[in-house]
Amino acid sequence: MIRLLTPHPALMVESGERVLLAADLHLGMEYDLAKQGINIPYQWTRMLDELLALLEEHRPDRLILVGDVKHGVPATSFQEKREIPRFFEALLEAVDRVDVTRGNHDANIQRYLPDEVSLHSSKGVIIGDEFQVACLHGHAWPPPEIMAVDCVVMAHNHPTVMLNTPLGIRVTERAWVRGRCDPESLATAFLEQDNLKTEGAPLEAFRENYLVEPGSPEIIIMPMFNDLLGGLPVNTESPKSLLGPLFRTDAVNMDDFDVYTLDGTYVGRVGFLRRRLESF
């Protein structure tokens, strides 16, 4: 079972163990802003307090941070070198297990993580017993095993939704985006990625080549935990402008995906929200 922890940008997976997921913290982004002449207070303690409060309230067995824990690319700032170890030491005092799935901003993060933290590659990690969830950042091509899970949780896009107010002012809010893929289209995308032939039967070819039983997993795109990051309004962008290789295939029809704000309000499907915004 998956539960969005409204009004927070985090979710809980309950399947054999209780696992709390959050993504896109971008620790150390203040250093990058300072180089541009924008000075703001350090944010890592504020985000740590929010995570610790969630851990205290929901008591998970495990915490997984789904990529982009750090901000600096390719270099790592002095701020990140100082903050990341302290950040994770505090988390390890609050929860038994902490995992990180590597994001595109997480180069060399292994140098700053305590030994007790499990670091996974960009292909992510699969969790759960009867209900299985693949957790990956989303910037790299996913493993074929995601076709056999019940749900794929990814981040990377910093999804937001742009809404019109009665005053004619447009506001942008962080959002959850969730929907399902067509299994034949997704199987075809995997086969084409590996230059394999489908011969008109992509699901059968997928089984034979990957030894994985293809299904139709739900996809959940997580909002960014760091609320100071820029976001991508899903209803102002074409589906193929979304970040990550999976969204640049025909396997994902984003127009049919549902959008929820952080407080849990369902605001509509991406295609409807895009057409409505264009009509104003």
Image (spheres, rainbow, N blue to C red):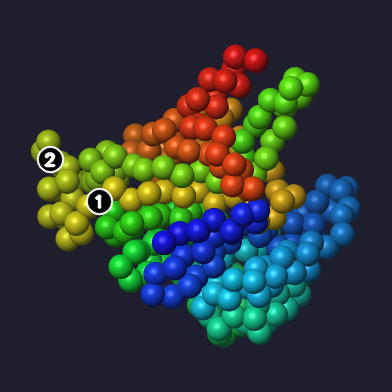
Please tell me which residue is depicted at 59% across the width and 58% down the height of the picture.
Answer: 5
Please tell me which residue is depicted at 48% across the width and 72% down the height of the picture.
Answer: 18
Q: Which residue in the rendered view is the most extreme toward the top? A: 279
Crowding at label 2, few (<14), some or many (≥20) Cα neighbours within 10 Å? few
User: Which residue occupies the foreground of this view, 103 or 25?
Assistant: 25
Element marked by disc 2: loop
Q: Amino acid at mark 1?
A: Gly
User: Which residue occupies the foreground of this view, 95 or 184?
Assistant: 95
Please name the residue that numbered disc 1 is placed on.
215
Please tell me which residue is depicted at 65% across the width and 68% down the height of the picture.
Answer: 54
Give the quadrant of the N terminus: bottom left
Please tell me which residue is depicted at 59% across the width and 71% down the height of the picture.
Answer: 58
Residue 143: give x, y in percent of width and height.
33, 58
Residue 9: give x, y in percent of width and height.
62, 55
Question: Residue 108 shows which numbered tag?
Answer: none
Q: Amino acid at mark 2?
A: Ala
Left or right: residue 59 versus residue 228 is: left
The answer to which quarter of the image holds residue 84 is: bottom right
- Eyeballing the image, is 44 above or below 206? below
Please name the residue that numbered disc 2 is placed on.
201
